[in-house]
Image (tube, rainbow, N blue to C red):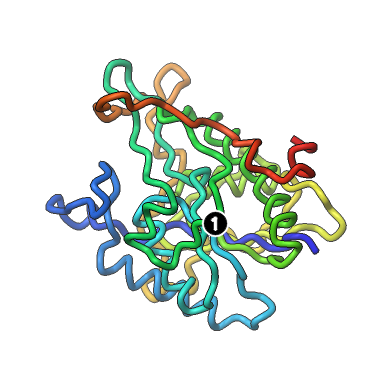
Amino acid sequence: MTVEHIYIARHGYRMNWVTDDWKSVTGLPRDPTLADFGVEQAKELAQHFLSLPEDQRPTAIFSSPYYRCLETAKPSAEALNLPLYVEHGLSEWYSPAAPGTGLHPRPASASALRAHFPEIDDSWESIYYPSRKGEDIPAVHDRSRELMRALVPAVEERFGGKHKRILLVTHAATVIALTRELVGDRGLPLRVGCCTLTVLQRPQGVRDAVGSWHPKKLADGGHLKDGVTREWGFDNCVIIDGKVVDHHGEPVSGNEVDHPVGLQVHLLPATVQARM
């Protein structure tokens, strides 16, 4: 059996949008928790999945390693009794780090994050790592395409076709890039609000992991009591001379380096490696 449906959710409303007086639970810069409103949104997302017939619910969750995404995924994992896997390929998008400002943050491993979220199943090793030097807009789309070309067949192979429906919990830019690459339209107009849900269906008989999925819902907020909030799209980006503006990195310490980066081919099943 193949993965037939992919659900993609953006994280809930962030604490740093409510107050500047917040503390990173993980100690990682730019890693806020959800605000109380965002926690409620995450619960509403879980209730939406519970309201679906059992044969339409996701059976596994893959989340960005950022706290706000794991906090968003947690109610659904608990309500549906699902495994929660961490995938760095779903991480936040940062535009290129300005020269001399350091590297962008990278969250901890799945094993380390279990200290905050015991629901995490750390048997899944991330198969993709974005560069800590940042990405321009085409690069985050390239990342999303490469990730999904590997992740979908890896899930099918590793779990023996058990998971026909998976949920990805990630960030606004990554939701958009993933959706565009799965659908096969890099110019697809899309703005994404907090805890909105995109639902994609794979056409029957299609083996390709990207490029032809059918969008059943795009950034839909019908399950949220207060509707769509804090929408974001790539049209929010500041473009100068045809390029997105640089973003400040974070000062690095010791021998901190930008590694690993890209697709971790050695972690993929041999049958998947052969297709890469």
Q: Is residue 48 above or below residue 60?
A: below
Q: Which residue is mark 1?
A: 123
Place of residue 124 in the rendered image (x, y in percent of width and height, measured from the top left)? 56, 54
Place of residue 38 in the rendered image (x, y in percent of width and height, measured from the top left)? 32, 65
Q: Is residue 55 above or below residue 265?
A: below
Q: Is residue 185 left or right of residue 167?
A: right
Amino acid type of the residue tagged 1 in the rendering: Ser
At a point 75% along the width and 63% down the height, the residue shown is: 161
At a point 35% along the width and 57% down the height, the residue shown is: 68
At a point 65% along the width and 48% down the height, the residue shown is: 151
At a point 24% along the width and 55% down the height, the residue shown is: 25
Q: Is residue 20 left or right of residue 248?
A: left
**Of 47 and 151, the residue lying toward us:** 151
Q: Is residue 65 above or below residue 244?
A: below
Q: Is residue 150 above or below residue 72?
A: above
Place of residue 214 in the rendered image (x, y in percent of width and height, measured from the top left)? 72, 56
Q: Quadrant of residue 227?
A: bottom left
Image quarter hosting the C terminus: top right
Q: Is residue 181 left or right of residue 122?
A: right
